[in-house]
Image (cartoon, helix red, strand yellow):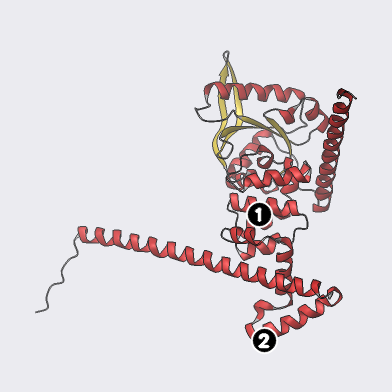
Amino acid sequence: MAKAKKKTTPVKIKKTDMLFSEIKSHIEQARKQVAVAVNQSLSQLYWNIGGLIHHHILEGNRAAYGKEIIATLSQQLTTEYGQGYNYSALTRMMNFYQSFPDKKIVATVSQQLSWSHFIELVTLEEEAQRMFYTQMAIAERWSVRLLRERIDSMLFERTALSKKPEKLIKQELKKLSYGAVTNPELVFRDPYLLDFLGLKETYSEKDLEDAILAQLQQFIIELGSDFAFLARQKRIIIDGTDYKIDLLFYHRGLKCMVAIDLKLGKFRAADKGQMELYLRWLEKHEQREGENAPIGLILCSDKSDEHVELLLLKEDRIKVAKYYTQLPSMKILKDRLHQAILIARQKEEIKKQKKVSDAEILTPS
């Protein structure tokens, strides 16, 4: 007779499962460490190759023959090591070295971003842009795909920070490298691109709110990864009168609530008073110990920069931004954003000159 098979007791199964989970955790951790080490080694290798090519061309005054040198070198390296060293790859490596000349920064950043991230970053011409997208990709853990989307949507140009002098931009971005996103000028954008909502030309505020909630994950991606949804139509009662906040979020980096008011039309001065009421109520009844004062974001289909300036909203806790449910052409959007940056920087320069002029008047000769 065949011997009866012994049944595995539930206790043994449970112990085996625990052992399996523990071993799996070690394997996954080791794989991640290996992936980081490989990526870091490759990035530093490509940086070194790019540097050697760059200096070889410049030191020998061979700039006119640069393309020929890279073409010849790519043939030799491709024969020896394969397509990873073709003409395009070597050009990228040289651009990588030129875009990130500091070896220590490359060593640090390559622990958190992949070579594929660097390929996207070296396409950016301005140093401030590269710093912004590099630091934000690290802080918010962007995938390569999300980084590409952020660059394509001109996220940097849509932040308030982009409108500051370049020296100040770099100072703020250096602070970002030490931790989470804590500067509102990096958090809030203008305009917001809400084309993913799929709204037609005619819609109500309720349609807009419903569409946002239906696409909440995508909306949070547009807002920023540190936003967490708290409530819709948050009911507040003041002196027996009911009010409702359209959307309420919490931002982990800023450590505060963010109340969002949706407007179909153009921003009006009265919208500020309404938002101030919401913020005072939230500060009094909802704000917890250790949190910062809440911030308001008024999203409208149009706004006047002069209105915003005269109401001193840029110095307040209330942000006003346009939104697009249907995007203009990227050329038009790019032109508008660059024009806005130019005007803002000109205003900053005028303010700076006025301060210097006023100081000279007050200083006795």
In the image, residue 359 lies at what x, y percent?
A: 85, 27
Q: CA distance from mark 2 to mark 1?
A: 34 Å
Viewer can see residue 106: yes
196 or 275: nearer the viewer: 275
Question: Looking at the figure, which quarter contains the C terminus?
Answer: top right
Name the N-terminal-most of marks 2 and 1: 2
Q: Is residue 225 left or right of residue 312?
A: left
In the image, residue 322 lies at what x, y percent?
A: 75, 38
| Image marks 2 and 1: residues in contact by CB distance under 8 Å | no
What type is the residue that disc 2 sits on? Thr
**Residue at the spot of label 2:** 79
281 or 86: nearer the viewer: 86
339 or 12: nearer the viewer: 339
In the rendered image, the residue lying farthest to the top is 239
Determine which quarter of the picture holds residue 20. Answer: bottom left
Q: Is residue 64 left or right of residue 178?
A: right
Question: Looking at the figure, which quarter contains the N terminus?
Answer: bottom left
What type is the residue that disc 1 sits on? Thr
Residue lying at 66% horizontally and 47% vertically, measured from the top left: 174
Label count reads 2
Check disc 2 and report its element: helix, strand or loop: helix
Determine which quarter of the picture holds residue 258. Answer: top right
Does 177 appear above or below 260?
A: below
In the rendered image, the residue lying farthest to the left is 1
**Residue at the spot of label 1:** 134
Does 340 appear above or below 298?
A: below
